[in-house]
Image (tube, rainbow, N blue to C red):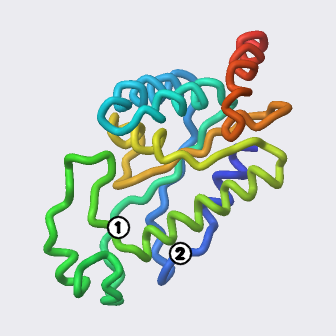
Amino acid sequence: MALEILAAARTAPKGKGFDNIVTYLLEGDEIEKVAAAMEKSAERLGAFFIRDAENIRNSDAVIMIGLNESRPLGLNCGSCGFETCADFKKAEKTKKTPFVGPICSIKIIDLGIALGSAAAKAKDMCLDNRIMYSAGAAACEIGLIDTECAYAIPLSVTGKNFYFDRAELAAAKERKMNRQ
């Protein structure tokens, strides 16, 4: 099922036909590495990283979708904050944040379409899911996914979606332990 979701992200439309989308399926120990990195980032980036780390740990699978090489497309639209794409290209890339910017806004839209396509495919397959900045940021910071920015889509099959009903998280954790 996860491969079908990755296919939905991969085949999503892209601005001017340039594909800079990267997809990745976290498996085994990689899930725990991301969760641990999220907990370490919580003090600096927000306490919700701790809550989200538990969501990641209790997921059946975690999909990563990111953007690599977000150079501008030559439209001079200005939505990135630069007057021209030439000015954008001259800008220094940030290194002090989880994501590396600036990023062309058209490429960010491509990423959003890929994320939406993947989340919709997961929902079509009746899989609980949620798009998470926190897990994507942690994966980028530890170099697990080679992208300038990434988001995660954790997947779960439970009676109630614990990504949105946080009270359900404890019950999901217990169910996962019983399956192992």
Residue 53 appears left or right of 141: right
Q: Earlier in the sequence, mark 2 or mark 1?
A: 2
Q: Position of residue 56 (x, y in %)?
A: 58, 31
Q: Position of residue 61 (x, y in %)?
A: 65, 34
Residue 171 appears left or right of 114: right
| Residue assigned mark 1 | 70
For the point 14% across and 74% down, the residue is 90
Closest to the observer: 15 or 100? Answer: 100
The relative height of residue 87 versus residue 99 in the rendered view (above or below) is below
Which picture quadrant has residue 102?
bottom left
Q: Quadrant of the C terminus?
A: top right
For the point 15% across and 70% down, the residue is 91
Q: Which mark is residue 14?
A: 2
Q: Quick one: SS at disc 2?
A: loop
The relative height of residue 119 versus residue 179 in the rendered view (above or below) is below
The relative height of residue 88 versus residue 77 in the rendered view (above or below) is above
For the point 59% across and 43% down, the residue is 63
Q: Quick one: SS at disc 1?
A: loop
Q: Which mark is residue 23?
A: none
Q: Quadrant of the N terminus?
A: top right
Q: Position of residue 8 (x, y in %)?
A: 68, 60
Residue 133 appears left or right of 149: right
Q: Position of residue 171 (x, y in %)?
A: 75, 19
Cα separation between marks 2 and 1: 12 Å
- Inspect the image, locate mark 1, and give the three-letter code of the amino acid beneath it: Ser
Question: Badge 2: few (under 14), some or many (20 or more) residues near its Cα, within 10 Å?
Answer: some
Question: Badge 1: few (under 14), some or many (20 or more) residues near its Cα, within 10 Å?
Answer: many
- Inspect the image, locate mark 2, and give the three-letter code of the amino acid beneath it: Lys
